[in-house]
Image: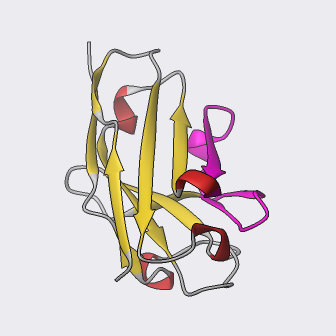
């Protein structure tokens, strides 16, 4: 079955970088768009960005533009979220998610309901 497993989270200081991984199994990664979401304590899950099958990125949050990028390695069935210049407000649980095969990255303001399959999340804490 479709499975997504995030890793790479941890505790970092402001200004530092982290790279999260999303390992996919049970399907062909190249057939699906992958999105990254963040849920801060006490807040709703927020869409950050998405990578389409071609590798094109869609940003959903202005707060991460210029700092976060997403990439994919279909041969390794893994999607990466590179996070630079981390800020305390980036603290939260980070999730990767995917949609049905060949569905593109959603446009506009994305809702978690537009993604069908989710990983368990990985905690990122940015604190001095």
Quadrant location of the C terminus? top left
**Residue 69 % position (x, y):** 63, 41
Looking at the image, residue 55 lies above or below residue 111: above
**Residue 3 % position (x, y):** 35, 71
Looking at the image, residue 62 lies above or below residue 67: below
Residue at the extreme front? 75
Colour setup of the view: secondary structure
Rendered residue at 29%/45% (across/down): 92
Residue 26 within the segment the image draws in magenta: no
Residue at the extreme left? 42
Rendered residue at 44%/68% (across/down): 97
Dividing the picture into quarters, in which one does residue 28 lie?
bottom right
Task: Left or right? Give the position of 86 relative to 118.
Answer: right
Quadrant location of the N terminus? bottom left
Rendered residue at 64%/47% (across/down): 71
Of the pair 18 and 65, the residue shown nearer to us: 18
Looking at the image, residue 69 lies above or below residue 50: above
Q: Which residues are magenta?
A: 50-74
Task: Left or right? Give the position of 85 relative to 12.
Answer: right
**Residue 87 % position (x, y):** 42, 26
Q: How many marks?
A: 0
**Residue 64 % position (x, y):** 58, 41
Of the pair 107 and 97, the residue shown nearer to us: 97
Residue 52 within the segment the image draws in magenta: yes
């Amino acid at each position: 079955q479709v499975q997504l497993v995030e890793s790479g989270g941890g505790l970092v200081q402001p200004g530092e970088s982290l790279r999260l991984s999303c390992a996919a199994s049970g399907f062909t990664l190249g057939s699906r768009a992958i999105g990254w979401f963040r849920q801060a304590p006490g807040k709703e899950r927020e869409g950050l960005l998405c990578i389409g099958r071609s590798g094109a990125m869609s940003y959903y949050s202005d707060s991460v533009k210029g700092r976060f990028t997403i990439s994919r390695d279909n041969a390794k069935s893994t999607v990466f979220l590179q996070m630079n210049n981390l800020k305390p407000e980036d603290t939260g649980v980070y999730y990767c998610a995917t949609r049905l095969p060949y569905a593109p990255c959603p446009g506009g303001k994305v809702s978690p309901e537009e993604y069908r399959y989710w990983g368990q999340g990985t905690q990122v804490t940015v604190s001095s």
